[in-house]
Image (spheres, rainbow, N blue to C red):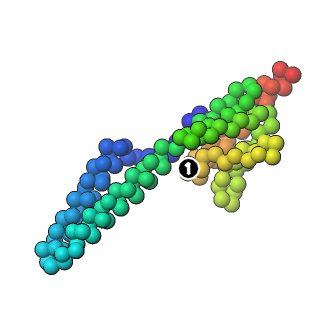
């Protein structure tokens, strides 16, 4: 299962947005300079650079994702792009959805791992239900093998 944040803007769309916003800022600055504010174009350039950097950083945050793999012997959660990988024994994992802050946490043997922090609250609820069903099925298969 792949967990990815919702992103409605492509890289091409981000570039177009930045170009439009820079053009609007520079047009407004030129109008200000024409009326006597000689520092308006300089301020618009600084503002445009800061805005482009901020939008790019926010857009890159959408690259993070988590891959959850469940088989007979392990539940593995791999966080990307950091390559952090955590493994649990599926028959001991508990799925906890905190009602106060909406965090979805996997717990086993004293270890906690929050998953899906970038998902919306309703998506985390659906993920918790789905994981509980999958883990219950996995625990049933493990008991049959023993």
One can see residue 136 in this view: no
* Residue 80, percent from left and from top: 55, 40
Within-10-Å neighbours for mark 1: few <14, some 14–19, many 20+: some
* Residue 9, percent from left and from top: 38, 47
> Which quadrant, please, contains the N terminus?
top right
Residue 130 or 45: which is nearer the viewer?
A: 45
At 56% from the left and 48% from the top, the residue drawn is 119
Residue 40 or 4: which is nearer the viewer?
A: 40
At 81% from the left and 46% from the top, the residue drawn is 110
One can see residue 71 in this view: yes
Q: Quick check: 109 left or right of 44? A: right
Residue reaching furthest to the left: 34
Q: Which residue matches tag 1?
A: 118
> Which quadrant, please, contains the C terminus?
top right
Q: Quick check: 33 left or right of 18? A: left
Residue 46 found in image quarter = bottom left
Q: Quick check: 142 left or right of 55? A: right
Residue reaching furthest to the bottom: 36
């Amino acid at each position: 299962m792949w967990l990815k944040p919702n992103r409605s803007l492509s890289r091409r769309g981000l570039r177009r947005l930045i170009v439009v916003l820079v053009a609007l800022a520079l047009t407004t600055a030129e109008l200000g300079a024409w009326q006597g504010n000689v520092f308006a174009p300089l301020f618009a350039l600084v503002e445009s650079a800061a805005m482009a950097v901020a939008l790019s950083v926010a857009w890159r945050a959408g690259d993070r994702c988590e891959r959850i793999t469940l088989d007979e012997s392990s539940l593995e959660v791999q966080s990307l792009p950091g390559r952090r990988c955590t493994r649990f024994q599926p028959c001991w994992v508990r799925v906890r959805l905190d009602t106060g802050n909406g965090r979805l946490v996997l717990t086993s043997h004293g270890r906690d791992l929050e998953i899906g922090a970038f998902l919306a609250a309703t998506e985390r609820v659906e993920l918790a239900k789905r994981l509980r069903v999958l883990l219950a099925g996995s625990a049933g298969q493990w008991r049959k093998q023993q």
